[in-house]
Image (tube, grey):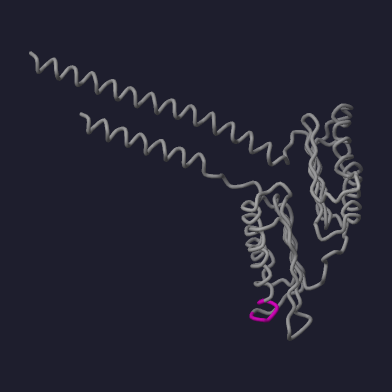
Amino acid sequence: MSVTISTTAASLSFLLLTILSFLTTPASSSLQSFIFGGCSQLKYTSGSPYESNVNSLLTSLVNSATLTNYNNFTIQSPSSSQDTLYGLFQCRGDLSNGDCARCVAAAVSQLGTLCLDSCGGALQLDGCFVKYDNMSFLGVEDKTVVLKKCGPSIGYDSNALTRRDAILGYLGASDGSYKPYRVAGSGDVYGVAQCVQDLSASECQDCLSDAVERLKTDCGPAASGDMYLAKCYVRFSERGAHSHGGNDDHNDDEIEKTLAILIGLIAGVALLIVFLSFLRKVCEKGKGGK
């Protein structure tokens, strides 16, 4: 009987570890959710020095993302200035190096499919941005609107609009310091803003201020809004839909609740098995005594 109990306990332990492993394995990350992408119409020839430069650049971006959340590269070809390539990546300011590297790797992989043989391409995921081109764009301010999205109208709810305007005001304001990544929250309204770090402090501020004004004008009394310019973005949501940390906290709570229930059930089953084994042993002794 002891062998049976030991085997059962081992099976239960294995089941528990399997469940724990399954629940603690990260789900498909929203950091890699597609926001927008685009490719240059100009194509390069397969097997050309430019293709080699593209592969080298994209590899450098992925490798660098394990160490920092922003970097840019210029790859020059000794044979021709036309083969010179410029590129950068940037991750959201709250990401760890590991999350940043995974996001950039996913973006580079998608770019390889989306912009096959293109001389330039750009891809924005929820957690990172990657761009490369044969025309220099590094350090160049660009406030072209690349994506605008407005949520449903909340009507003229004065309290909600006041909170939203306060958040957008903070995201678009300057305190004299260089802050390429900004977050703000008030009640159930959350906002995040970021500019690409090849911009100067004044250019970054100018880009974010413009994005904020466009959001106010174009989205009006919306419950949420996204305004992506070529070199910066501003997002807000009434329910904090863009808050990475908030979603993680919610998911962690749900996982903890599920684990507590499962562990309780498994513990209950284990106790029941032990109790039944004890009763069986008592019964066998009783029979033996007779």
Residue 134 versus residue 38: which sits nearer the camera? Answer: 134
- Whether the magenta-drawn stretch holds residue 243 is answered as no
Residue 39: x and y in percent read 75, 65
Residue 209: x and y in percent read 90, 48
How many numbered marks does the figure carry?
Answer: 0
Q: Is residue 290 left or right of residue 217?
A: left
Residue 160 versus residue 290: which sits nearer the camera? Answer: 290
The C terminus lies in which quarter of the figure? top left
Residue 115 versus residue 286: which sits nearer the camera? Answer: 286
Most distant residue in the top direction: 290
Q: Is residue 62 above or below residue 235?
A: below
Q: Is residue 164 left or right of residue 70?
A: right
Query: Image point 56% across, 44% down: which residue?
Result: 27
- Whether the magenta-drawn stretch holds residue 48 is answered as yes
Query: Image point 65% across, 79% down: which residue?
Result: 46
The N terminus lies in which quarter of the figure? top left
Query: Image point 85% across, 31% down: which residue?
Result: 163
Q: Is residue 129 left or right of residue 112?
A: right
Most distant residue in the bottom direction: 79
Most distant residue in the front direction: 177
Q: Is residue 61 above or below residue 80?
A: above
| Magenta segment | 47-52
- Image quadrant where residue 171 sits: top right
Chief SS of the magenta region: helix
Residue 153: x and y in percent read 83, 34
Q: Is residue 228 above or below residue 109?
A: above
Residue 176 versus residue 14: which sits nearer the camera? Answer: 176
Query: Image point 84% across, 29% down: which residue?
Result: 160
Residue 206: x and y in percent read 91, 52
